[in-house]
Amino acid sequence: MKFFVDTADVAAIAELAELGMVDGVTTNPSLILKSGRDILEVTREICGLVDGPVSAEVVALSAPEMIDEGRKLADIAPNIAVKVPLTWDGLKACKALTTEGFTVNVTLCFSAGQALLAAKAGASFVSPFIGRLDDINMDGMDLIADIRTIYDNYGFGTEILAASIRSVNHVTQAALMGADVATAPPDVLKKMAEHPLTDKGLAAFMADWEKTGQKIL
């Protein structure tokens, strides 16, 4: 599974990238707002930190405007993935932009039917939102499983990018369901390294080591 980090925080991206934990980055208007920076400026800086796709989202609602915005965003760097919403106009924009050779991430996917349309439109990625489905008492993992089955049935090359990830368990379950990518906030990726038994075991080892009176350095 590939890990994308869902943030526009350059410092957080740089830290994870240094460890080799980032295969790409996803941003959206809310994350750009949180960064407090100009979208073109911060996106360009992010593209310089990672080799993989950096999703930058259009804000237009009509297909022609989405296409124009997508072209401008794609000019930022070669590793830009233009992010469009899963609407009919978004699908039109996806088809046009992929035909021109751009990488496209179709976002705000909440049904298997929507995911099927995204694949037919040539999307490089489709982003089903796990957490937001959980919020309305639906199981987001069922959607991941359904999309995986449909894509495998017909050999679609669109990658399933599990989004709206809220917990370590979301990442694990998405991997088990066969998602190609998980995009998560930096704190969720860091929490994947944590386990109470790891902490307990380390504390015991350190206590025993202290009793030896030895030093390595």
Image: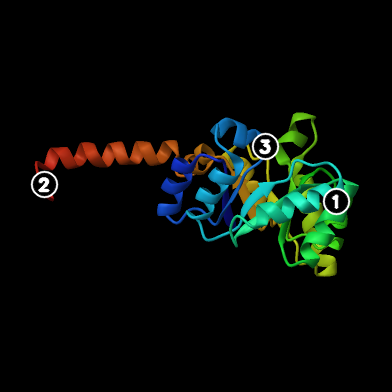
What's the CA distance linking mark 2 and mark 3?
51 Å
Residue at the (61%, 36%) spot, across then down: 31
Q: Is tag 2's residue or tag 3's residue first in the polypeptide sequence? A: 3
Q: Which residue is mark 1?
A: 64
Secondary structure, mark 1, is: helix
Secondary structure, mark 3, is: helix
- Name the amino acid, label 3: Pro
Q: Front-most of 25 and 32?
A: 32
Give the colour scheme of this rendering: rainbow
Vertical order, 147 against 191 (above or below): below
* Residue 35 image position (x, y, % from top left): 54, 34
- Do we see residue 176 in this rendering? no
- Name the amino acid, label 1: Pro
- Do we see residue 6 in this rendering? yes
Q: Which residue is mark 3?
A: 29
Residue at the (59%, 37%) spot, across then down: 167
Vertical order, 103 against 134 (above or below): below
- Name the amino acid, label 2: Lys
* Residue 33 image position (x, y, % from top left): 61, 32
Q: Is tag 3's residue or tag 1's residue first in the polypeptide sequence? A: 3
Label 1 CA crowd tier, 10 Å (few <14, some 14–19, many 20+): some
What's the CA distance linking mark 1 and mark 2?
67 Å
Instruction: Tell me the quarter of the picture where residue 170 sits.
Output: top right
Q: Which residue is mark 2?
A: 215
Res. 56 mark? none
